[in-house]
Image (tube, rainbow, N blue to C red):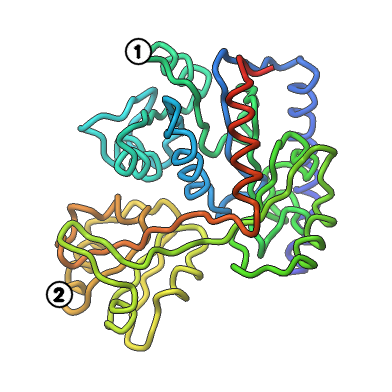
Amino acid sequence: MKYLRLLLLPFSLLYGCITGVRNVFYNTGIFKSHSFTVPVIAVGNLSTGGTGKTPQTEYLIRLLSQQYNVAVLSRGYGRKTKGYILADDTATAQTIGDEPYQFFSKFKNIRVAVDANRVEGINNLLGLEPKPDVILLDDAYQHRKVKAGFYVLLTAYSDIYADDFILPAGNLRESRAGAKRAGVIVVTKCPPLLPEAEQQRIIKKLKPSAGQQVLFTSIAYDDSVYSDAGILAVAEIKNTPKILVAGIAKPQPFYAHLQTGGDNIRTYPDHHDFTDAEINELKQLSEIKPIVTTEKDYVRLKGKLPADRLYYLPIKSRFLDNGSNVFNQTILHYVEQSTGNR
């Protein structure tokens, strides 16, 4: 792997130059960025995936929807449709994408829309009545056509961007300098008890700019798995021979949390569109053992497998130490004080 990266470094330098010039053009106004009259918060990363954007976006939804009319706008990766779509009762994972459909299914007090053109998507949302008080952009850190008022940058504890390379030698979509746009940097998927000395070591490596907060989160697994037919305690399902199914970027923690002897594992690519043959195979397997999957995979498999044989394990993003207070106050202050993105 080390030698392969060395071979790919010239291509990474070229890719880095292209993305670097693009960012300079946006920073200097040669390329136009659009601002809006409502607070816009963008959640994203510098790398290609697996940093926990979905649970972090859900955290923001829970925080803000208590007092604001919240809308979430996503590209809708993997959907079978095009253009702007506002989720309604006819929405599916195929029409709006798995992550937006997950948001729509879980949070009935918000609006969820998809549009690859984020500028048009925001304008369409602002035409609704009542108009959203705040708009969350899911996976939009590199979408420079929109000038968000606040950026939340995520980086995984096991693969922080300071140790990575630009594509294709590494996994970065742009150079580490892009981190300067963030108001908050969140190191995700940390051990629940991360020593203060280790946190400081990571902060030193990330080299945050003046005023940038660096916070740490871990994944909090639910105590139960859920299906349309019922609920089982995780302690019970752990001791049950089962099929673990995951089509996410980095499924190893999910497996490690649930796997015991006698389990079978089926791993698919991120945002995987299950074929008829794969569905039939899973149906046959479910006759012998129940299937437990991730929440994102569940919205794609729901209705295709027997309801009483398909379960999902919810997760949440949990801040370490006093991080939740710092994050909450920072976000709420931005939304309260913002009359636009300047």
Q: Classify residue 246 by image quadrant.
A: bottom left
- How many marks are shown on the rendered structure? 2
Nearest to the observer: residue 178 or residue 82: 178
Q: Classify residue 148 by image quadrant.
A: top right
What residue is at 36 percent from the left and 67 percent from the top? 223
Give, as a three-letter code, the residue at label 2: Glu
Q: Nearer the viewer, mark 1 or mark 2?
A: 1
Left or right for 279, reference 70: left
Name the residue tied to disc 2: 287
Whether residue 294 is situated above or below residue 81 in the rendered picture: below
What residue is at 48 percent from the left and 47 percent from the top? 54
Nearest to the observer: residue 95 or residue 41: 41
On the image, the x and y values in percent for residue 181 come to: 73, 34
Q: Are marks 1 and 2 in contact (CB under 8 Å)?
A: no
On the image, the x and y values in percent for residue 151 come to: 65, 34
Give the quarter of the figure containing the C terminus: top right
Q: Classify residue 40 by image quadrant.
A: top right
Nearest to the observer: residue 218 or residue 325: 325
- Secondary element at tag 1: loop
Mark 1 or 2 closer to N-term? 1
Disc 2: CA contacts within 10 A as few (<14), some (14-19) or many (>=20):
few
On the image, the x and y values in percent for residue 285 come to: 21, 74
On the image, the x and y values in percent for residue 184 come to: 69, 41
Nearest to the observer: residue 233 or residue 156: 233
Cα separation, mark 1 vs mark 2, equals 48 Å
Name the residue tied to disc 1: 129
Left or right for 198, reference 320: right
Give, as a three-letter code, the residue at label 1: Glu
Disc 1: CA contacts within 10 A as few (<14), some (14-19) or many (>=20):
few
Residue situated furthest bottom in the rendering: 261
Left or right for 199, reference 265: right
